[in-house]
Amino acid sequence: MAGATTGVDEIPAEVRERAATLARELEEHRFRYYVKDSPVVSDGEFDALMRELEAIEEKYPALRTPDSPTQKVGGTYSTDFTSVDHLERLLSLDNAMNEEELDEWDDRLTRELGTGNFHYLCELKIDGLAINLLYENGHLVRALTRGDGRTGEDVTPNIRTIAEIPTRLRDDGGHDIPELVEIRGEVFFPVEKFEELNASLVEARAAVEHENEERRAQGLGPKALPQLPFANPRNAAAGSLRQKDPRVTASRPLHMIVHGIGVRRGFDIDCQSHAYERLHAWGLPTAQHNKVVATIDEVKEFVRYFGEHRNSVEHEIDGIVIKVDEIPIQGRLGSTSKSPRWAIAFKYPPQEVNTKLLDIEVGIGRTGRATPYAVMEPVTVAGSVVARATLHNQQVVKAKGVLIGDTIVLRKAGDVIPEILGPVADLRDGSEREFVMPTECPECGTELRAMKEADIDLRCPNARSCPAQLRERIFYLAGRKAFDIEALGYESAVALTRPDAGPCVLATEADLFALTAEQLRDVQMLRKVNRAGAAEDEKELVPYFWSRAEYDKEGNVKKPSKPKANTDKLIKELEKAKTQPLWRVLTALSIRHVSDTTARAITRDFHDLDRLAAATEEEIAAVDGIGPIIAKSIVEWFAVDWHREIVEKWRAAGVRLAEEGADVEKAPGPLDGLTAVVTGTLTGYTRDSSKEALEQRGAKVTGSVSKKTDFVVVGDNPGSKYDKAVQLGLVILDAEGFAVLLDQGADAARAWAAERADG
DNA sequence: CACCCTCGAGTTCA
DNA sequence: CTCGAGGGTG
């Protein structure tokens, strides 16, 4: 390893060059981030570059010049506002990227301080804009942005527009207002309001675009366009605070939360956490989620908890800040030139990344709806590699402002579904092109059209023979909500409906129950060639439901082709599906607006599919939960010839189209009239079996939490529903409480929950 | 008519 | 999980 004595000359040229490139790039990004509020790389990428440079400098300290980006605390500042020196330099925090690094930090502290002599204060690290407020004798005299840590910008007039930041500290009666105190905090834009703001920005922009068109027609010059939507809430916060006109800032829903105290005179405190309480009493906004703990294990628990609930807080979180709570100990530990030794920031993996939008393609769904989706350069976000994301419809594509070829900002909404936030307009090179919605169905060529005048969605009207729609319908009718045919998954649905390989055995779903093993013999599927020397993308047609026959040298059959195990299973399951309850049959028909829940409601009143087919709109709309629109949709469905043919062929194949014993009144259950929601996974139950257990006892199980919900059953890894349930003060049951509810009834479960809350 | 609740539809990856 | 829209209620 090269020692500290290594001169610059001895460092390999490529290392020097790499370091210089990194320094240049980091400077550029920093400039864009702080001055222009328009970063072209995500935080994650910026951190990665910074870490690489740090690693090089660690190895070759000679490269660590005072002007290296690694030696600067924050960023630089915009020249539009007056620069003012901070009273005291604002330091940044060391980062921990994983739990090991937290342990290392904890080891250092316990070595120096001894075990059990101090506490940790855990705070959410808000992804916003750091601000430093100066109060003299309780009056807000100045508000500076963080800037480079030494000098910030004076944004006092704009800060004054934030309602929750007091311009005078409230005298709480118990404690004297200090002569001077610096309050540090984070200004943020609530995630919930962010979409709203962007929508209005898009609208304003569209209006000016429209106006410019008219002006051009009149030979006038164009007006300047209003700004593009913000890529994320943090940029929205920065952009809103940096308005030259404070009235614009005032119109934005900015908030602030205090996270530190700087220079102070006449303000003595023993603990950081107590200081926050005092500040709260003086009227300053403090955090709801802070926690003081004794051990690093509890810190990790806090870190893990909010890692899973990042989205249930009103602001974005990019990490957790952990501080030694006792102020005297903070003083004892001191700081390096860059950061205090008594605090560390645990950084979550970035939820937002940049990638390239390669193309926008259009998919056709079960109901014929044409949905544009993004095809992207594969990229890892929140733990998985993502290459596609839905764009919902043309309007959304337009609203997001993305062009094909753009670098885009991608994130996981609710940590699952990839969502495109918007383009990085500054990285455009002119080769990007606008997405044009196709006029024809990409699968069958039929002209797409809006079903109603005002509809945004375009649909392929060729419901009967569009291969995409047939394939999706087959897949759906085999699903959990319909016939529940395990052996018929997506792949099989594709094989059964291929129009381009061999005979298509299913012209529509009418023929499904007449399928025989014999018919399936010739069904083929396009598969990657699995043979030495085959090209990577070489494909061939292979039988899908039957095994391939083997021949000897003379060309005689050595092993005949025969149905695969899964094929026998399919035939058996089709047989079983014929006696499924009526609501499943009704769901399987893919009637618009009729899915499992609605189908169940209908079959409570109509025990016979023929009676439903013969019913009028009024009769159907009389069913509880069914209105005129769904009723009309049903009547219209049965009026189509090939739809009725599906019913007739199914009937001929032996599918049961009436509810047996339906006239028997359902016995009253112990949980009649109660509504429950299940969230997360319960040990010993699947999603469906827990639901079934409740329904069997007469309870109604819904998908969303509201004040009408009587019980919320929470398993492991609960989602946002749990948070909402807490918010609404509902009765929450875990696996144990769930057992009480099932075995002993509602009152016992309520008692159980109440007792749990007290203990 | 204005709410609030629910349902349907489309969706990604391993 | 999220969106939009249908249905019911005050």
Image (tube, coloured by chain):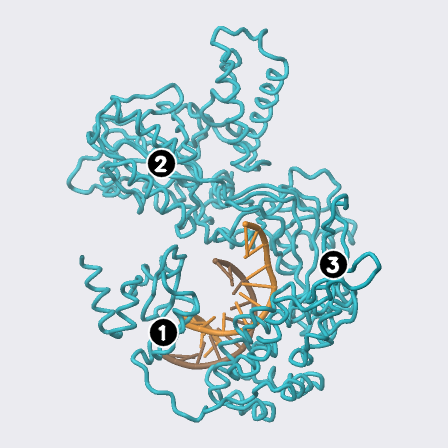
Chain colours: A cyan, B orange, C brown
* Residue in front for this viewpoint, A333 or A733: A733
Residue A307 appears in view: yes
Q: Position of residue A396 (x, y in %)?
A: 62, 57
Residue A248's place in the image compared with A645, above or below, is above
Question: Whole-Å distance between the Cαs marked 2 and 1?
Answer: 42 Å
Question: Whole-Å distance between the Cαs marked 3 and 2?
Answer: 53 Å
Amino acid tagged 3: Leu
Residue A757's place in the image compared with A519, above or below, is above
* Residue in front for this viewpoint, A666 or A575: A575
Quarter of the image for residue A36 reads top right
Q: Position of residue A191 (x, y in %)?
A: 46, 50
Read off the residue under disc 2. Answer: A321
Q: Is residue A246 left or right of residue A225?
A: left
* Contact (Cβ within 8 Å) of mark 2 with mark 1: no
Marks 3 and 1, the one that precedes in the sequence: 3
Marks 3 and 2, the one that precedes in the sequence: 2
Residue A436's place in the image compared with A673, above or below, is above
Read off the residue under disc 3. Answer: A526
Q: Position of residue A516 (x, y in %)?
A: 68, 77
**Mark 1 Cα shell of 10 Å, populated few (<14), some (14-19), many (≥20):** many
Question: Whole-Å distance between the Cαs marked 3 and 1?
Answer: 44 Å
SS for callout 3: strand
**Mark 3 Cα shell of 10 Å, populated few (<14), some (14-19), many (≥20):** some
Q: Determine if marks 3 and 1 fall on one subunit.
A: yes
Q: Position of residue A89 (x, y in %)?
A: 38, 23
Read off the residue under disc 1. Answer: A694
Amino acid tagged 2: Val
Q: Is residue A559 left or right of residue C2?
A: right
